[in-house]
Image (cartoon, rainbow, N blue to C red):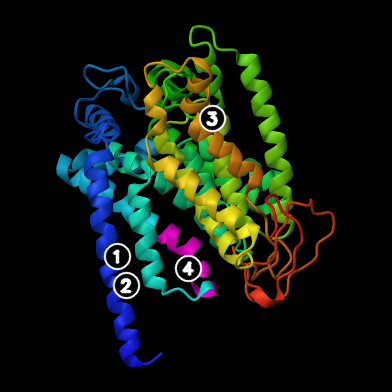
Amino acid sequence: MTVAQGARRTAAQVVGVVVLAVAVAAFLSVAAVRHGFFDLKVYYGALDFWVHDDGEIYDYLKPGTQYGFTYPPFAALVMLPMAYLPWPAAITVSVAASVVVSTVLIWWLLDPVSRRAGWTRWFALAVALCLAAAYEPMRETVNFGQVNMLLLFLVAVDLLRLLPAGNRWAGVGIGLATAIKLTPGVFIVYLLVTRRWRAAFTSMAAAALATLVAAALFPDASREFWTSALWNTGRVGELAFVSNQSLRGVVARLDPEHPSTLAWLVLVLATLALWAWRCRAAAAVGDHATGLALTGALMCLVSPVTWVHHLVWLIPGLILLVDNAVAAPAGSRRRRALAGFAVVAYGLLCSRIVWAWEKDFTGLDGFLGSNTYVWISLALLVLLPIRRTASPAGHPGAGPAGPAGSAVEPADVPDLVEVHRGTPAGERHRVGGALPVG
């Protein structure tokens, strides 16, 4: 490519990004709900009540609502500086933090795809960030002032960077995320299921240490949380509310007055069994990026409450669908199936489609439509391909996509396995997969 051709290409890409950004801004002006940083106001008000009014943080309820601070005391310790910031500064920090960690996470997942596909890397990232801004869970996270992306980032540091490199600190991020909000503790289970013993014990130690530090500093708040606030499910909202896109929400919407706990537990156990099998397959070939995506989908499914903004945990899975589609042979049914899956899933997750059944989720259409995001999470858990890396699992040097080189052939790997992400198109071979092959 000549200098002139390169300049024209760059100019076209800049124009393309600007046009896409304007289109996304127009879409958001119509589709995005303005929540006024509702959750951030809860955190801010609870911390102000705790620090400046000498109240107990778990006694605080946002005026006119049933909502209070629901996170463990270590989260309160992490958020404590917010009590000394003016409200506009708290908003700025919240939005900036989500944008920065989202950019880094998307770069980690997308940059290897860009390099292998020959895409202009800055252009691919810019397009991805525009698309992320339109993604309903992302815009809900920002508009509520939620901490979801910060927790996902902490987990991703472990699974995408430290664990594949054999770093002894792998697990600390998962432990801290668990101490901030208990649900990321499912990634400790991932480490145990995949026999990453050192990282698992490191994560448990980090979570325990953070919790003990918070207990030593705030004994009254810790006692209140672990003995009372944790078990007060009324503080988080109604299980049958359409925003609850978990298996518990599915069951609750079938019978809002008397949701079956037994039916939910059966679904959870079946989902856990499928997840464990798939994650062991991913870890056996060193594919911790897919392990991250599968466990994120699992967390959304089995958590009793998964509000729409929690579905940012599906972002790694959606990006890996694109990765697998790009890696598939050009023109193949596999490429079309994976690309189609990614486009449809992303489109639905931008559309607010579940809200069409907010008032009435009865009947077959209500059952299918009000749980649309649950079906997407399940589809990712079942169909997201697993692919080999160049180094055996657990050996230093096997990154999330693996360095360039030949695929390894570990024994006893289930059939849901795809080729190494770094293998050139002419050398790819089919190993197996959950979607059709062309």
The alpha-carbon separation of the residues under discs 3 and 4 comes to 31 Å
- The disc at residue 197 is none
SS state under label 4: helix
As shown in the figure, which amino acid type bears the numbered disc 3?
Ser
For the C terminus, the quadrant is: bottom right
The alpha-carbon separation of the residues under discs 4 and 1 comes to 17 Å
Q: Looking at the rendering, which quadrant does residue 417 occupy?
A: bottom right
Q: Which residue is mark 4?
A: 111
- How many dots with numbers? 4
Q: Which residue is mark 2?
A: 13
Q: Nearer the viewer, mark 2 or mark 3?
A: 2
Graded by Cα atoms within 10 Å as few (under 14), some (14 to 19) or many (20 or more), the crowding at tag 4 reads some
As shown in the figure, which amino acid type bears the numbered disc 4?
Asp
The alpha-carbon separation of the residues under discs 1 and 2 comes to 6 Å
Residue extending farthest bottom: 2
Residue extending farthest top: 257
Q: Looking at the rendering, which quadrant does residue 205 occupy?
A: top right
As shown in the figure, which amino acid type bears the numbered disc 2?
Gln
Q: Which residues are magenta?
A: 104-116
Q: Return the x and y of residue 96 as percentages of the image width and height.
A: 27, 53
Labelled pair 4, 2 in contact (Cβ < 8 Å) = no
Query: Counting residues from the N terminus, which is met first, the one under dot 2 or under dot 3?
Result: 2
Q: Return the x and y of residue 374 as percentages of the image width and height.
A: 53, 33
SS state under label 3: loop
Residue at x-position 47% and y-position 68%: 111
